[in-house]
């Protein structure tokens, strides 16, 4: 009897599981994914497939409004930009072979290459560029709309020439728009109706190094090399197929790399995992600099933090060198002033960092009139809340170090390292005393200074909430300067002014480490920042296989 | 009987409405703002406002709620903020994977848990019982992500027996695809069952032990029935109902477990969709997923209620 029951139970179990497999089987590899069976089994050198680990699914396939980092990876490869950024953070030609200015900088002209082609055979022309910019302005799409604020009109002069007429000269206009704006095909997007509602989630027509080809929701994104990409090496890119595979958990992604399930991690390797990955002989690591930096920013609307002496004293309780040595394990550079050393030309190297000296900070505060009436070692008015994003492990540790050092100087820092979304909400609304965070990507110093320090707060990231007419004047003056040398000098002056005001205490420019299967691939041409890293279309097209 | 069924149905509908309402307002009470989760800073207040209006977040809260309910009763779960595609499509693309994973875990937990509980109850104090109790307590304390990463390191990475992440090898077709599907399913399924099984077997053991002490069991024994027949035919029939109901109640935990399991194993189900949507504050997707899950759990409970009504004569009258 028991045997019978067991048999019945086993049969019903098998039936149930089979039914479930069948339910799922409806979407089993038969449709949706166009990968060919049996790849890798050919005798000849099979076209290479490079698999990249990504952390989330693509949120939005519309390159005009997509906002997430992982979307950017795939869309930047599919849709060309006018300029790209090289390893040294210099803007170099991509779709535009050069740009020039006219009328004292108030007209910016892009001269396009004539050999870019959309994958349906239509040439990429100045009309596509003009259409893209106009659409972004009309629908206020994504973060590029802010870069186009100055555009009064767009003039298509011929197939390869497009001019932007600006309301006033803006020095980094070409670099900002050139780098951030992905160009879309006019003949496709003009048919799509309301572009703010256009999902663009199939039949992609691109002109970048790789074109999104198929998607298996929740699992993988397959891109194919664009045979007509002008920057591909002679004979075409060695990597014919790029597959993005989703691993939401970074530890799982590391295991997948070690096992050879993926060839490259799109996201940087956490410091804690570097040692174990480095010991694997099949894995190579490339280090790239960041286009952002970690910083403490002071809310100058706070009555006490409005005092320059207090901000300077706070800058003297931050031991940046030791933070870099211990928390970043040496993978970062110190910076002085708000301009990152990656922009070597603009960085004011004459600035001296505030010395790490809590005792001197205490003296400075006493001289400024702060007192410790109850004798508990802490100044009476000097208690501040530091908000930080708890998902950034480095910053939560920095917060603790700074809090302890500040206590020595008589400053009490209360830490509020909170969930990322809440953190963003609080910093955006100015609901904090001190903000400890890390800027993501600043591709040029002028845009950065304008976004962060102009009192009109054009980019919404004036976290200092500073309203300083002198600083406004300096920023606006530099922004309209067409002469390059004078422009550089003015940027350096702003650097010095902000440093003297101690509006922020810069902490470090992080180095990101990217891991890949060095036993299979080589020849990446990485770009600074974790947004670009090893996965730009240009870099992927330069990769070769290791025999 | 009909009245009982009707009252249960009404209660189910009420529960779903409460779940929908609570989800809606909880998401809006979050201090974070989905229009701020952009890749980088440069976004003017005007653009933010444009996004907010595009998301429908500029309308008064009650109006948003009314619109949402109106759409919901028409079976429309809305459109994802970020992906601009209908939430129903997103969920439908992920649901089969979760059904496979959580459904198989559900069935396996029953199939393994029942004999474990029964044997432990029958041989109380013996080796099997002690092992089941030890396993029950240990498995109750396990944290899915830790178990999952341990399984991945040992069986995926070190031994290389199972793939790391994903649900299927894209290069397979036909039978090979099904084999690949099961191959990928093994580790996530194992971790989910491992965590579910212990508490389940323990509760069943207690139920069974109670049933075994009842008079009708003693009388069955005294009628000379074999112990095996007494346990499996008479006792289990009465213990299996609470066992089923227990699984119905545990469905919520199972789904919570699936969120974590799917995230660590990179399994493309609804659980992972929820994880991703939380990061992006994609309200429509979160709401849609919670509605679907709430309906699933409530329906499962309704079914167990109705089942127990059919099987239990005391409720029937």
Image (cartoon, rainbow, N blue to C red):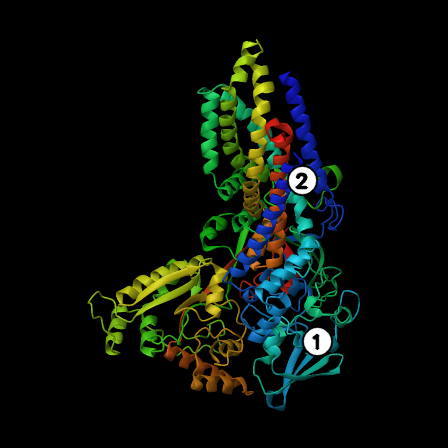
Q: Which residue lies furthest to the bottom in this view?
A: A103
For the residues bearing labels 2 and 1, Cβ distance under 8 angstroms = no
Quadrant of the frame with the N terminus of chain B: top right
Query: Which x, y percent locates residue A36?
Result: 75, 48
User: Label 2 to label 1, Cα distance in Å?
Assistant: 45 Å
Judge the density around disc 2: few (<14), some (14-19), many (≥20) Cα neighbours within 10 Å.
many
Viewer-side label of 2, 1? 2
Quadrant of the frame with the C terminus of chain B: top right
Which residue is rendered at x = 54% and y = 87% of the image? Answer: A481
Mark 2: which secondary structure?
Answer: helix
Q: Which chain carries label 2?
A: B
Query: Which x, y percent locates residue A272?
Result: 45, 52
Which residue is rendered at x = 68% and y = 73% of the image? Answer: A95
Mark 1: which secondary structure?
Answer: helix
Query: Which x, y percent locates residue A177?
Result: 62, 76
Disc 1 target residue: A129
Q: Which chain carries label 1?
A: A
Judge the density around disc 1: few (<14), some (14-19), many (≥20) Cα neighbours within 10 Å.
many
Q: Residue B172 carries which label?
A: none
Q: Which of B106 and A443 is in front in this view?
A: B106
Say if A164 sits above or below A116 in the image: below
Q: Are the residues flagged by discs 2 and 1 from a single subunit? A: no
- Locate residue B168: give its quadrant: top right
Looking at the image, residue A349 sits to the left or right of residue A5; the answer is: left
Looking at the image, residue B61 sits to the left or right of residue A414; the answer is: right
| Camera sees residue B113 | yes
Looking at the image, residue B233 sits to the left or right of residue A445; the answer is: right
Say if A530 sits above or below A116 in the image: above
Q: Nearer the viewer, residue B89 or A230?
A: B89
Q: Which mark is residue B181?
A: 2
Query: Which x, y percent locates residue A345?
Result: 49, 78
| Camera sees residue B44 | no
């Amino acid at each position: 009897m028991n045997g019978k029951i067991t048999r019945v139970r086993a049969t019903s179990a098998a039936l149930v599981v089979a039914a479930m497999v069948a339910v799922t089987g409806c979407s089993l590899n038969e449709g949706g994914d166009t990968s060919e069976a049996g790849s890798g089994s050919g005798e000849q050198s099979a076209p290479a497939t490079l698999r990249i680990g990504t952390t989330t699914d693509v949120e939005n396939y519309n390159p005009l409004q997509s906002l997430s980092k992982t979307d950017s990876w795939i869309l930047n490869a599919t849709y060309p930009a006018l300029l790209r950024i090289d390893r040294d953070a210099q803007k170099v030609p991509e779709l535009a072979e050069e740009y020039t200015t006219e009328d004292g900088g108030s007209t910016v002209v892009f001269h396009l290459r004539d050999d870019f082609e959309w994958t349906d055979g239509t040439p990429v022309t100045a009309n596509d560029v003009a259409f893209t910019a106009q659409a972004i302005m009309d629908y206020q799409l994504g973060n590029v709309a802010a870069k186009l604020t100055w555009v009064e009109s767009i003039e298509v002069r011929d197939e390869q020439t497009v001019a932007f007429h600006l309301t006033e000269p803006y020095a980094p206009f070409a670099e900002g728009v050139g780098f951030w704006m992905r160009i879309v095909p006019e003949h496709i997007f003009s048919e799509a109706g309301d572009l703010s509602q256009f999902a663009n989630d199939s039949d992609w027509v691109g002109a970048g190094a790789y074109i999104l080809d198929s998607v298996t929701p929740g699992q993988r994104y397959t891109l194919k090399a664009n045979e007509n990409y002008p920057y591909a090496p002679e004979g075409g890119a060695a990597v014919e197929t790029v597959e993005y595979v989703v691993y939401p958990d970074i530890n799982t992604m590391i295991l997948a790399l070690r096992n050879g399930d993926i060839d490259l991690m799109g996201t940087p390797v956490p410091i804690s995992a570097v040692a174990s990955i480095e010991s694997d002989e099949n894995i190579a690591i490339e280090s790239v600099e960041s286009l952002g930096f970690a910083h403490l920013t002071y809310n100058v609307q706070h009555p006490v933090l409005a005092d320059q002496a207090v901000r300077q004293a706070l800058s003297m309780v931050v031991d940046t060198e030791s933070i870099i040595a211990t928390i970043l394990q040496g993978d970062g550079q110190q910076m002085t002033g708000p301009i990152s050393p990656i922009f070597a030309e603009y960085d004011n190297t004459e600035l001296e960092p505030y010395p790490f000296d809590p005792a001197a900070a205490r003296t400075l505060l006493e001289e400024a009139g702060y007192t410790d009436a109850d004798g508990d070692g802490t100044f009476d008015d000097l208690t501040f809340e530091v908000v930080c994003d708890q998902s950034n492990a480095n910053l939560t540790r920095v917060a603790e170090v700074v809090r302890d050092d500040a206590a020595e100087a008589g400053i009490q820092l209360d830490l509020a390292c909170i969930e990322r979304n809440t953190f963003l909400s609080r910093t955006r609304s100015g609901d904090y005393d001190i903000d400890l965070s890390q800027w993501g990507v600043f591709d040029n110093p002028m845009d950065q200074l304008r976004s962060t320090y102009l009192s009109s707060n054009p980019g919404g990231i004036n976290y200092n909430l500073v309203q300083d007419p002198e600083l406004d004047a300096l920023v606006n003056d530099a922004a309209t300067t067409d002469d390059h040398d004078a422009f550089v000098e003015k940027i350096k002056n702003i650097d010095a002014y902000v440093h003297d005001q101690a509006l922020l205490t810069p902490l470090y420019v992080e180095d990101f480490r990217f891991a890949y299967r060095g036993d299979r691939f080589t020849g990446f041409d990485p770009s600074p920042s974790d947004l670009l890293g090893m996965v730009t279309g240009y870099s992927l097209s330069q990769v070769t296989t290791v025999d | 009987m009909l009245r009982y069924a009707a009252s249960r149905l009404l209660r189910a509908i009420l529960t779903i409405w409460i779940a929908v309402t609570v989800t809606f307002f909880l998401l809006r009470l979050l201090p974070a703002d989905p229009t701020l989760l952009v890749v980088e800073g440069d976004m003017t207040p005007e653009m933010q406002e444009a996004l907010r209006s595009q998301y429908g977040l500029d309308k008064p809260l009650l109006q948003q709620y009314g619109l949402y309910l109106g759409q919901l009763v028409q079976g429309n779960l809305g459109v994802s903020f970020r992906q601009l595609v209908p939430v129903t499509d997103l969920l439908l693309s992920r649901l089969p994977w979760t059904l496979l994973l959580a459904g198989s875990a559900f069935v396996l937990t029953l199939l393994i848990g029942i004999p474990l509980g029964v044997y432990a109850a029958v041989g109380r104090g013996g080796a099997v019982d002690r092992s089941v109790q030890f396993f029950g307590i240990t498995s109750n304390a396990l944290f899915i992500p830790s178990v999952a990463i341990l399984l991945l390191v040992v069986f995926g990475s070190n031994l290389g027996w199972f793939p790391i992440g994903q649900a299927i090898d894209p290069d397979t077709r036909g039978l090979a695809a099904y084999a690949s599907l099961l191959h990928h399913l093994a580790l996530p399924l194992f971790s989910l069952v491992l965590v579910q099984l212990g508490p389940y077997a323990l509760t069943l053991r207690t139920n069974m032990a109670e049933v075994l002490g009842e008079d009708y069991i003693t009388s069955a024994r005294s009628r000379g029935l074999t112990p095996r027949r007494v346990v499996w035919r008479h006792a289990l029939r009465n213990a299996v109902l609470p066992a089923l109901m227990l699984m119905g109640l545990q469905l919520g935990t199972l789904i919570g477990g699936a969120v974590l399991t799917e995230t660590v194993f990179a399994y493309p189900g609804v659980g992972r969709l929820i994880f991703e949507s939380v990061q992006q504050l994609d309200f429509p997707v979160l709401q849609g997923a919670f509605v679907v899950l709430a309906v699933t759990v409530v329906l499962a409970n309704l079914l167990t209620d109705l089942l127990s009504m059919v099987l239990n004569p005391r409720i029937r009258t």
